[in-house]
Image (cartoon, coloured by chain):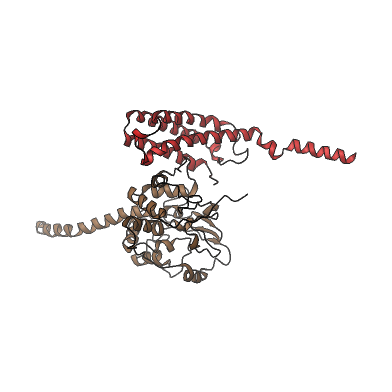
């Protein structure tokens, strides 16, 4: 009987303190997962546009509407603030987010705003069809990504 | 009365103008070489004065601190002659005759031409001197004994300059000069053996023991473990913006290399780097994140 009680206490303790399975479903883990999905989406939009800028395809041959693609990037960039606004910080498992994001929230938000601004100008420039201007605008977006990542992400792989 | 000196002054001015011009040219060329060579990275502390030293480079042998290389005569290299500077980069030997640790990538810089080394000096000497002492390296025994570098040099060091290879075209040769000497890509991308020497049969194939514990990727054209599936455009894009083919951004040390270095190169030089890298023998060598 005593053994059974001990085992029950053990199980209860495991449930209370959490196993890896339980952690995966925690609030923190969900927030981190959401953040990562938003950033992945931003990256995917950039990757799509990148195929153009590398000069392998000319503007007229691009198999998508650059303007819409830039608008999608801009819309996704709107989600960055709210994704990181939750006070979860670097908790919640495997994150590359640096604590500096929340220590320098103003700076972080300003950089996210820069991405929105530059993706908006890319969208505007795309309307003109001017290939050189589109490429320059895209480079501006790329620099916005890079400078923010350099300040706020610890890349692990 | 003073008028009769005027022709003399004009003559002297004419004489010195081309000299001053040549010096300006060297400084401008040096600025470019300085960016390509990534000098700023190791010789400037985060938030510190330019080239005043102090940046920590953590390695398996201990921590190196980049010294002050501003033209300050006492704490920097302001007292160095051209010969001193050439010897440091070509031979890895200080003006006092001490061996440098190969953390200073002289084993790559040795490949540079005399003209490039001296242009680099001209640029560095045009910068502001900073009177700040350099920090001593913090190395583990026995690496803290400099004489111990003699066998290292004998085993691994081949003095330059790099000779052009007539079997390859101009772009490849320029790329070789950039990758092997000036930009010193192999210093991080080639794994090191337990003596800190390059494992030449894994040249450019990446390592999990990079600076600051970084994972340094395989940049040989192996399609699966290297960059064999990257186009020339992918590489140019990466070296100018830090953006990977999938839209992600590179991190840490490589971002600095791009921000201060490869993004400032001419498009032709970035293309030459791509030509050289894509002509490397592909090496199958997967570099993956270590399990925590």
How many numbered callouts?
0
Q: Horizontally, is B71 left or right of B10 in the view? A: right
Measured as percent of width and height from the top left, residue B160 is found at 38, 66
Residue A133 in sight from this viewpoint: yes
| Quadrant hosting residue A90 | top right
| Quadrant hosting residue A69 | top left
Q: Horizontally, is B30 left or right of A16 in the view? A: left
Residue that extends furthest to the right in the rendered view of this protein: A1
Residue B184 sits above or below residue B254 on the image: below
Measured as percent of width and height from the top left, residue A150 is found at 48, 43
Residue ID at (50%, 59%): B202
Residue A88 sits above or below residue B58 on the image: above
Foreground: B186 or A47?
A: A47
Measured as percent of width and height from the top left, residue B47 is found at 46, 47
Q: Quadrant of the N terminus of chain B?
A: bottom left
Q: Horizontally, is B116 left or right of A68 in the view? A: left
Residue A53 sits above or below residue B177 on the image: above
Residue B126 in sight from this viewpoint: no
Report the chain shown in red: A
Measured as percent of width and height from the top left, residue A117 is found at 42, 31
Foreground: B187 or B244?
A: B244
Foreground: B157 or B82?
A: B157
Report the chain shown in brown: B
């Amino acid at each position: 009987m005593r053994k059974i009680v001990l085992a029950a206490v053990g199980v209860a303790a495991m449930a209370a303190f959490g196993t890896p399975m339980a952690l995966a479903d925690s609030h923190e883990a969900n927030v981190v997962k959401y953040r990562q999905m938003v950033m992945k989406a931003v990256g995917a939009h950039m990757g799509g546009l990148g195929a153009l800028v590398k000069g392998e395809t000319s503007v007229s041959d691009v198999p998508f509407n650059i303007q819409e693609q830039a608008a999608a990037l801009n819309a996704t960039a709107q989600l960055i603030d709210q994704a990181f606004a939750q006070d979860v910080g670097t908790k919640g498992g495997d994150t590359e987010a640096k604590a500096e994001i929340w220590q320098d929230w103003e700076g972080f938000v300003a950089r996210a705003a820069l991405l929105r601004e530059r993706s908006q100008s890319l969208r505007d420039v795309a309307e003109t069809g001017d290939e050189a201007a589109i490429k320059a605008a895209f480079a501006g977006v790329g620099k916005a990504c890079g400078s923010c990542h350099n300040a706020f992400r610890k890349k692990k792989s | 009365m003073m008028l009769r000196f005027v022709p003399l002054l004009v003559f002297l001015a004419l004489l010195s103008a081309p000299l001053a011009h040549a010096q300006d040219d060297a400084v401008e060329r040096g600025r470019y070489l300085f960016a390509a060579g990534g000098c700023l990275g190791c010789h400037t502390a985060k938030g510190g004065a330019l080239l005043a030293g102090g940046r920590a480079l953590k390695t398996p042998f201990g921590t190196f601190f980049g010294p002050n290389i501003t033209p300050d005569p006492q704490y920097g290299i302001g007292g160095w002659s051209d010969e001193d500077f050439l010897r440091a980069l070509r031979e890895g030997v200080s003006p006092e005759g001490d061996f440098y640790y190969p953390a200073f990538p002289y084993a790559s810089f040795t490949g540079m031409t005399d003209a490039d080394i001296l242009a680099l000096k001209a640029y560095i000497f045009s910068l502001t001197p900073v009177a700040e002492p350099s920090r001593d390296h913090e190395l583990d025994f026995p690496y803290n004994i400099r004489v111990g570098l003699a066998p290292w040099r004998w085993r691994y060091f081949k003095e330059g300059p790099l000779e052009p290879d007539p079997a390859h075209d101009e772009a490849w040769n320029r790329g070789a000069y950039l990758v092997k000497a000036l930009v010193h890509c192999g210093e991080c991308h080639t794994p090191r053996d337990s003596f800190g020497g390059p494992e030449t049969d894994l040249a450019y194939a990446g390592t999990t023991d990079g600076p600051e514990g970084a994972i340094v990727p395989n940049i040989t054209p192996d399609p699966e473990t290297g960059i064999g599936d990257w186009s020339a455009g992918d590489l140019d894009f990466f070296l100018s913006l830090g953006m990977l083919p999938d839209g992600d951004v590179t991190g840490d040390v490589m971002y600095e290399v791009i921000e201060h270095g490869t993004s400032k190169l001419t498009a032709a030089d970035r293309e030459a780097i791509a030509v050289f890298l894509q002509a490397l023998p592909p090496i199958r060598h997967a570099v993956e994140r270590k399990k925590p």
